[in-house]
Image (cartoon, helix red, strand yellow):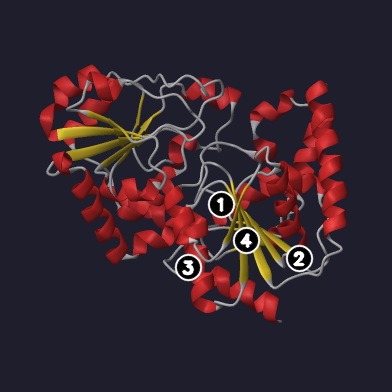
Amino acid sequence: MLREAAISCYLLLFKLFFTIFKIFPQQKKVTFVISFEENAIYLYRELRKQDPSLKLAFLCKSSVSGEFKNELKDTKIIPFETKNILNWFVSLFHLSTGRFVIVDNYFGFLAAVTFKKNVECIQIWHAAGALKTFGMQDRSIRYRSDSAKRRFQEVYDKFHKIVVGSDEMASIFREAFHVPSQRMLPTGFPRTDFFYDKEARDAVVTSFYENYPMLAGKKLILYAPTYRDGQLKNSEFHLDIKQMQQKLGSSYFLLIKLHPAVKTKTNYQELYPDFVGDFSSYKRINELLVVTDYLITDYSSLPFEYSLLKKPIIFFSYDLAEYREQRGLVKDYERIVPGPIVFNTDEMIELIEADSFDEQAIKEFSSRWNRYSNGQSAKKLVEYILNQINS
């Protein structure tokens, strides 16, 4: 009750000042609100390429890396959702005076704003696909108040367009956000352009092994589990790393990449220095995917992008029934995933040692879920934006 009241007061204040700032003239400007950088960096580069004169403003959450900010030297970068009142007012100014607002996540402030008539808000999302439910399909939403549910829907209603990489993802967005098909924008996800750029991939591989020469020649296993409720300060997971090291030996190395929301660090790197590396602070996950030989995940969206590399994926879904009940999974999860589902470390080790995976299933999965993500996604989306601005 108190939490809802506090949120309502904040949104009322946001609405008041947003309305005041709308008095300022609209600019030929694109305002980004981002929590993940991999879509945004490709859009930034393409916007600068196609129209260097276009004004850009980036409202960035703390999860965005310094490397990203350094590349945007000619662009306004404002820390977003901080306690700095000046940054708050500057953010409001850019949100209320841009021609386009591009977001990559759920941002509650959208429930409070009414954009000018010609403004478009585009949701570029932070994942190329979905195995777990989200939005209005998230099973945990049943415990929220009616006012909270209305607020969520008010946010989703602000998305004039939603970028999709496939018809399957369009269907998921329609159900998750309760929005019509006309809002889907099938340009593909800009972040997937990286996988079609051999020069960029090769540069990442070279840089990685320059930084981690001790990993050269090893088979790299990336373990990247999704976030689970209550895990913010608990980084424990169910892999028996000691057993993996004993069975797989020195030819393999395990990269751990916890969800960005999990703030605690593991001590596995100290316990098994020759077998484990904690890469949770590594901002650009797609770069890790390029050097990875085996991806181990569960309900994460990583397989949708990793499948573009046509490499093995193992689904370590040890809590499948519990997760489906509490959080929710897409229909036919077991049928959709393009790799074996395992429930313990023994099964996982056997699969890695056998090194026998269904390559055709991975290819078909990638083709189905990355239909519009064909290496030109940033170009197509920027062309759409500029056509709207200049029309």
Residue 9 figure quarter: top right
Callout 1–callout 4 Cβ contact below 8 Å: no
How far, Cα to Cα, is label 2 from label 4? 15 Å
Query: Which residue corresponds to the image point at 87% horizontal and 56% vertical from the top-left?
Result: 20
CA separation in Å, label 1 and label 4: 28 Å
Residue 5 seen: yes
- Drawn side of residue 157 relative to residue 176, left or right: right
What percent of the width, then of the height, locates residue 356? 20, 40
| Point 30% across, 52% down: residue | 310
Q: Quadrant of the C terminus?
A: bottom right
Question: Which mark is in front, 1 or 4?
Answer: 4
Residue 169: image tag: 1
Q: In this view, does 331 lie above or below 38?
A: above
Between label 3 and label 1, give the one nearer the viewer.
3
Q: Mark 3 points at which residue?
A: 45
Amino acid at dot 3: Arg
| Disc 3 to disc 1, C-alpha distance | 25 Å
Q: Which residue is drawn at 64% across and 33% down?
A: 138
Which of discs 2 and 4 lies nearer the camera? The answer is 4
Q: Mark 2 points at which residue?
A: 119
> Where the N terminus falls, by quadrant?
top right
Q: Which of marks 1 and 4 is nearer the N terminus?
A: 4
Q: Which of marks 4 and 3 is nearer the N terminus?
A: 3
Report which residue position mark 4 lands on: 57
Q: Earlier in the sequence, mark 1 or mark 2?
A: 2
Q: Which of marks 4 and 3 is in front?
A: 4
